[in-house]
Image (cartoon, grey):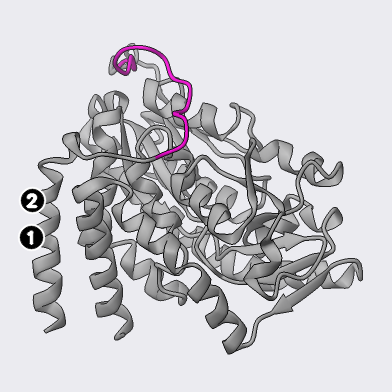
Amino acid sequence: MKRKMFAIAVFVLAAALSFSACAGTQQPAAEPSAAGQPAASSAQPAPGEKITMKISHVSSPGSARDLGCQKLKEVVEATVGDKVEAQVYPSSQLGGQRDQVEGAQFGTIECVVVPTSYLGGTTPMMTLLDTPYLLPGDPEQLYELYHSDAIKALMDTTTEKGFYTKAIWQTGYKAWTANKPLIDPAEMQGLKVRVMNSPILFKQAEILGASPITMDFSETYGALQNKALDGQENPIDTIYDMKFHEVQTDITITNHAGLDQVVLVNKAWFDGLPDDVKAAIDDGIQQGGRVCLDETLALAEKDRQLILDTGKTAIHDLTEDQLNAWKEAMKPVQEFARTSQGDAGAAIYDAIVETRKSITGE
């Protein structure tokens, strides 16, 4: 029965996608972007010159995301190093995450690794993955979901915007930070919280009674420090990596969604590559994703303890009843997410739900 239901969901998904250009959307203001079509060049370098592949992300060196990117570089150069020089740029060296999405779209950066939420102004369909409690809570089950046909259909929606979504890398489940425990969702009422440019994250804040404030990732620490923000959501290792625990007294482990990364590659550039280079990049991205997940799991335990060792920040784990209260509070967000991208979005959402059920045995 589950296979039959999934087959029906995939059929509906395929039909709905054919009308995706006409589907209505509800979203925050679009990201700034250059006019016209993507202007990336697919020209190959002169004889004897190597192809340059810039790989950009915002995390610090040694983070799970950075180690995934380093693995991508390693695989590419080990396989086609005579043709390609891969360069990793961590710590927002090539701009903030919005800048990086534009770089991948218009060809100034060949490859970027950014949260799905940062596609909200470009391809808001991808922000369906921001839906709270939509994804499996087990990392290995989520890894399987991210390699499913349902997710492939979702990733394919970005192609018309000038970039390929090659993979989704896992970087952990979100927790809330604030200057008080957030055991009950009602305690979010009135808080100013940082959100990324995702319609679903805006709705999440609204449903919880919080005030959503968009700002770049690199500005978040200062805003928490000077009380322009009251809280934010991120996985434990990211909280430690960005030192948010230094300016927040409490972390509440809600695990309400993944903060996962899309690997974007400029379409015109990639289409112009030799087949062996394309294959090496695809392989490197898959291997990098596995490294990113493994490092995320290892760093989460280590960084949790490092935060506790400071004696300045409390970490609150929820009981089953408390977690169920959070899940109940998020149901209106799920209902909004399913319909937020029209019929095509609803079909993709349903296919993800059916795939999750087949993986988890729900």
- Residue 120 vertical position relative to residue 62 in the rendered view, above or below: above
Does the residue at mark 1 contact the one at mark 2 (Cβ under 8 Å)? yes
How crowded pointer 2 is (Cα within 10 Å; few <14, some 14-19, many 20+) is rated as some
Q: How many numbered discs?
A: 2
Q: Residue at x 44, y 19 (%)?
A: 33
- The secondary structure making up most of the magenta span is loop
Magenta range: 27-41
> Position of 322 compared to 359: left or right?
right
- Residue 49 vertical position relative to residue 66 in the rendered view, above or below: above
The residue identified by callout 1 is 11
What percent of the width, then of the height, locates residue 281?
34, 42
Q: Is residue 60 magenta?
A: no
Q: Residue at x 24, y 79 (%)?
A: 358
The residue identified by callout 2 is 15
What percent of the width, then of the height, locates residue 221?
77, 44
Which type of secondary structure does the marked residue at label 2 adopt? helix
Q: Is residue 38 magenta?
A: yes
The quadrant in which the N terminus is found is bottom left
Of residues 276 and 299, the one nearer the viewer is 299
Which type of secondary structure does the marked residue at label 1 adopt? helix
Q: Quadrant of residue 162?
A: top left
Of residues 172 and 277, the one nearer the viewer is 172
